[in-house]
């Protein structure tokens, strides 16, 4: 059974600092991994999708890496802004299409 | 391209009643996933449908059921509602690359 862990559960940084969010998973036989952000009471917004064959994906200030052998993905957010404050979740889709979500990391960017 | 639509957005029901929630995926997407999100349990996978067939199922009691229609629209039904069913119910539309796009959710309150 795939288990997805996100540490830390919460993070507070001053504006301008780079953010590093971690996601680890127990079974490396994955189909893809996706990062989301969620604002309070809202749905999830897709940030980046990394296919199993890829090592990283980039979009603007966001960069996500994937290391299947070690069961890890890292989301980097450069030059954080107060608008980046949200909960960030990673989701792993296995080769049998089953989905597992981490509990999320709640980020606060202080102005 | 229109996003994922969920109706209704808010719902208040009484214990013992049943409820039906609806989800219209992004045009061209043939797969829909359902999730329950609560403060205590986080995001929990309910079930996933692909071309009208249930592809995966989470660990929820039989009171929770779903279906998908030929136009890819999906419904989920919860019978004999309990107080613990109060949650945000999220639907995700899955692209051919298995990337998930979430709707805004239905907030269900059971009194």
Image (spheres, coloured by chain):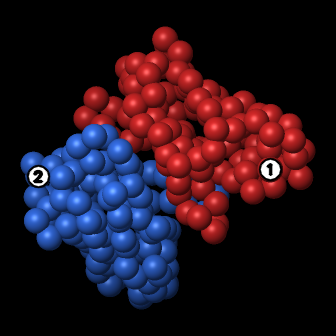
Q: Chain of mark 1?
A: B
Task: Determine whether A1 is above or below B81 in the image.
Answer: below
User: Farthest residue toward the front?
Assistant: B62
Picture quarter with the N terminus of chain A: bottom left
Q: Is residue B26 left or right of residue B21?
A: left
Real-space Cα distance between discs 2 and 1?
A: 43 Å
User: Farthest residue toward the top?
Assistant: B70
Q: Nearer the viewer, residue B111 or B100?
A: B111
Q: Which chain is red?
A: B
**Callout 1: SS:** loop
Number of numbered tags placed on the structure image: 2
Q: Is residue A2 left or right of residue A57?
A: right
Residue at image point 25% right, 35% down: B97
- On the image, numbered disc 1 is attached to which residue? B82
Q: Position of residue A80 (x, y in %)?
A: 36, 76
**Callout 2: SS:** loop
Q: Nearer the viewer, residue A64 or B19?
A: B19
- On the image, numbered disc 2 is attached to which residue? A54
Residue at image point 32% right, 84% down: A17
Q: Nearer the viewer, residue A70 or A18?
A: A70
Residue at image point 39% right, 55% down: A100
Image colour assigned to chain A: blue
Assess disc 1: are there few (<14), some (14-19) or many (≥20) residues with their C-alpha within 10 Å of its C-alpha: some
């Amino acid at each position: 059974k795939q288990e997805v862990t996100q540490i830390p559960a919460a993070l507070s940084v001053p504006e301008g600092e780079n953010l590093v969010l971690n996601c680890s998973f127990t079974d490396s036989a994955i189909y893809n991994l996706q990062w989301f952000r969620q604002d309070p009471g809202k749905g999830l917004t897709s940030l980046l999708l990394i296919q199993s064959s890829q090592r990283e994906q980039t979009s603007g200030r966001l960069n996500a890496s994937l290391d299947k052998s070690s069961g890890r993905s890292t989301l980097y957010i450069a030059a954080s802004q107060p608008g980046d404050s949200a909960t960030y979740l990673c989701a792993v889709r296995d080769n049998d299409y089953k989905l597992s979500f981490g509990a999320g990391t709640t980020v606060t960017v202080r102005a | 391209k229109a996003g994922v639509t969920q109706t209704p957005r808010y719902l208040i029901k009484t214990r013992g009643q049943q409820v039906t929630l609806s989800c219209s995926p992004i045009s061209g997407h043939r797969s829909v996933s359902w999730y329950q999100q609560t403060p205590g349990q986080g995001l929990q996978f309910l079930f996933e449908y692909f071309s009208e067939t249930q592809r995966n199922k989470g660990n929820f009691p039989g009171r929770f059921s779903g279906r998908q229609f030929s136009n890819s629209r999906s419904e989920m039904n919860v019978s004999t509602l309990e107080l613990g069913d109060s949650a945000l119910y999220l639907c995700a539309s899955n692209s051919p690359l298995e990337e998930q796009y979430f709707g805004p959710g239905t907030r269900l309150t059971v009194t």
